[in-house]
């Protein structure tokens, strides 16, 4: 096996590992292979080149690149004199993690807090309604306590998200020094 074949074998091992674990980001195995392939490319790739490398259609490549772009795992780049769209994988995995999870967590926090606040208002109405039996009021009070605990969690999660986005997290959990 020559040097290039050995290099390709080492790369393929990592590409397959990425593809097998990319579901953490909510994407498919084939999109993981797409990201892994682009990660090892020295130059930005066109959809056609990516399709040839993976044996997939341009339509599949387009849809996959759109997903990866939305996740901020791939960037569209401009190269002077090139008319086709070019794409490059984000190589900073810390930033990819931050972008993906901060976006997803922030959206989930917002949705859940809105629903909790609506439910808290409804529970207050139950508790104040004199026509509601005492047992229901007791359950509503218990539910309010649970929901206030949930709100405390979401406040904590919001701080975690902010520490990711501001990179403050790296003061507590430093990035390792890059190996050469």
Image (cartoon, grey):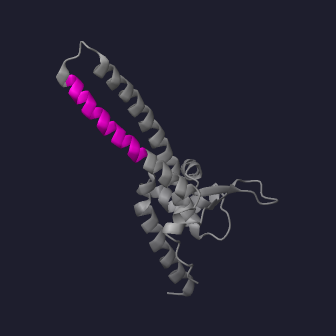
Image check: 68 left or right of 136? right
User: Dominant secondary structure of the magenta stretch?
Assistant: helix
Quadrant placement of the C terminus: bottom right
Instruction: Please report the bounds of the magenta region as a residue range.
Output: 136-154
Residue at the image point whose x is 57% and y is 78% from the top = 178
Residue 135 is situated, as x and y percent measured from the top left of the image, at: 17, 24
Residue 14 is situated, as x and y percent measured from the top left of the image, at: 47, 71
Instruction: Pick whichever, 124 or 48, lies toward us.
Output: 124
Residue at the image point whose x is 64% and y is 56% from the top = 75
Image check: 168 left or right of 134? right
Residue 136 location, quadrant:
top left
Instruction: Pick whichever, 97 or 3, lies toward us.
Output: 97
* 48 w.r.t. 151: above or below: below
Q: Is residue 150 magenta?
A: yes
Residue at the image point whose x is 65% and y is 61% from the top = 45
User: Taking the image as drawn, is residue 101 in sight?
Assistant: no
């Amino acid at each position: 096996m020559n040097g290039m074949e050995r290099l390709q074998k080492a790369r393929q091992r990592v590409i397959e590992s990425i593809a097998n674990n990319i579901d953490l980001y909510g994407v498919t195995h084939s999109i993981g292979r797409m990201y892994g392939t682009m990660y090892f490319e020295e130059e930005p790739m066109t959809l056609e080149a990516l399709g040839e490398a993976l044996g997939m259609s341009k339509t599949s490549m387009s849809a996959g690149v759109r997903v990866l772009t939305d996740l901020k795992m791939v960037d569209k780049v401009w190269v002077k004199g090139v008319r086709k769209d070019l794409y490059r994988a984000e190589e900073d995995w810390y930033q990819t993690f931050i972008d993906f999870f901060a976006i997803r967590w922030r959206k989930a926090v917002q949705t859940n807090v809105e629903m909790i606040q609506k439910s808290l208002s409804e529970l207050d109405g139950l508790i104040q309604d004199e026509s509601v039996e005492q047992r229901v009021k007791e359950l509503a009070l218990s539910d309010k306590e649970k929901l206030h605990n949930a709100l405390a969690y979401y406040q904590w999660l919001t701080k975690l998200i902010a520490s990711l986005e501001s990179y403050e997290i790296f003061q507590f959990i430093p990035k390792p020094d890059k190996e050469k």
